[in-house]
Amino acid sequence: MQHGQYARANLDKAVAEKLPIFGFEAEPNKAALERGERSVKHFYLDRTHQLQGRIGLSLYELEKKLHIEDAFRKRGIADEEDPNLPASLFELVGTTIEPPAAGDYQIEDAREEHEVDLPLEGNQSADVYARKALPILVAHVLQQQDGVMAPITYRRLAELLGRRNRHGDPWARGLGFVLGRVTELIDGVRSRLTEPPPFLTSIVVLSSGPNVGLPDKGVSGVWPGYETMSREEKRAKLAAEFQRILAYRSRWNEVLRLAGLPVIEPPVGSNGIPVPGGWGGGESEAHLALKLYVRDHPELVGARADWDAWVEYALRSADELEVMFLSDRVWIGVEVKSRTSDRNLADYERGIYQVVKYRSILEAQALVDFPDAQPEIRVVLLLERELPAVYRALAAHLRVTVIDGIVPTNAQIECDA
């Protein structure tokens, strides 16, 4: 009964504050069920589903809509409940945010804001932690590839900083205050930089709660109005800043040098050679292999072997299509996402919108170049992994063709790598 009361309170809170609701799959204890007892054998924290609540209806209203009693009767199940009692129905829906993971349930995560009391053994000052954190964040940025920024959670940053509580667990509490000091460090050298740096600490995000995957409220000091934005507006703001952070590339080392901190050496690939592109945003071997594989297999996107095939085809908007097939009558552009995008699933959403943009640009170019007989324009999104379920409805709504599960053969990778 106590668990039921907690669950009811949580549901009421979620409905009132319009928070997403997740349910975990459970396996019943069959032996207990046979004795007429309700007992759960296992909860599966890696099997989550988002639930859309139909709350406040009576059983009578639900029966009128869904004919629940008929379904029970057909299965020989009797229902003696009063049909006028309030009832709740939940349906499984496509997820609107990344579901929580088993490792996210840490009490420290609920206290990641600007709290300064840090009951740690051997605790260091926020300024000392900030000088440790800045190189860690820069090194993380410089390791990213394919224009995909994998954010860092507060808890992970605490682990990298060696901030632990007396039990040895990573301690994220008060890290917002430390990150504020990191921003002050960067601001202190801003006037000596040829180009102002982006908002680096925005790559540190919450791992649980209603703002999971987003920076904490402390960013409002740099981004006025952030607190009043919708979740989608916050996500778009963050995605744009991630691209600016990646584009700053080796200039982050100049920030470190001016702050009196050691610079970060360029990341090195498995072959011992610096990663192509040199710094954050460079192309991964997986992404290059997938592009070349698509170029050499035009049938994957409905093109033919006798068409012109291009990699990194330049558009007049200064964008580049990763693969382009051209014939007299049909142009097919391909936006490619390798398995690297799994590091930040929002990159798949970005890919959908990239297709929409490139399609419009190609249509405009065709209209200018061939005003009397434009070629047919197609742009597709081709993925090494499967498109996350949360983005399938978006792709369909925007008429974006998605071809997923395309894995280059080993021979292709070894030949072109």
Image: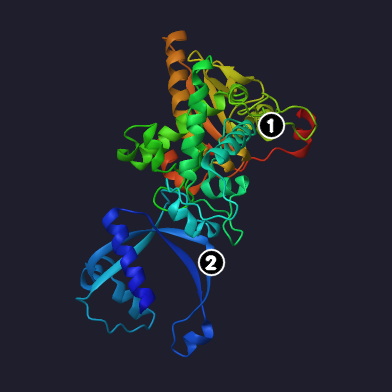
Where's residue 54, x and y in %? Answer: 28, 62
Q: Are marks 1 and 2 in contact (CB under 8 Å)?
A: no
Q: Residue furthest bottom?
A: 35
Depth order, front residue of 330/401 = 401
Q: From the viewer's perspective, tell me whether residue 174 is left or right of residue 64.
A: right
Q: Is residue 351 above or below residue 50?
A: above
State the colouring used for the structure image: rainbow
In front of the other: 10 or 255: 255
Report the residue marked by disc 2. Answer: 44
Which residue is more in the foreground, 49 or 239? 239
Q: Is residue 94 left or right of residue 10?
A: right
Which element is circle 1 on?
helix
Q: Which mark is residue 148?
A: none
Residue 35 x, y percent position in the rendering: 47, 90
Q: Residue at x 30, y 60 (%)?
A: 13
Q: Which residue is located at x 33 percent, y 84 percent?
A: 78
| Image point (75%, 32%), residue name | 269
Q: Is residue 406 left or right of residue 240?
A: right
Q: Quadrant of the C terminus?
A: top right
Q: Check disc 2 and give the amino acid type.
A: Tyr
Up/down of 118 relative to 45, above or below = above
Q: Nearer the viewer, residue 373 or 7?
A: 7
In three-dimensional space, the C-alpha distance between marks 1 and 2, rounded to whole angstroms, equals 38 Å
Q: Where is residue 379 drawn, in percent x and y?
A: 51, 28
Hey, what amino acid is under mark 1?
Tyr
**Position in image of residue 246 (x %, y %):** 56, 28
Secondary structure of the residue carrying tag 2 is strand
**Callout 2: 10 Å neighbours few (<14), some, many (20+)?**
few
Q: Is residue 83 above or below residue 308?
A: below
Residue at which label 1 appears: 293
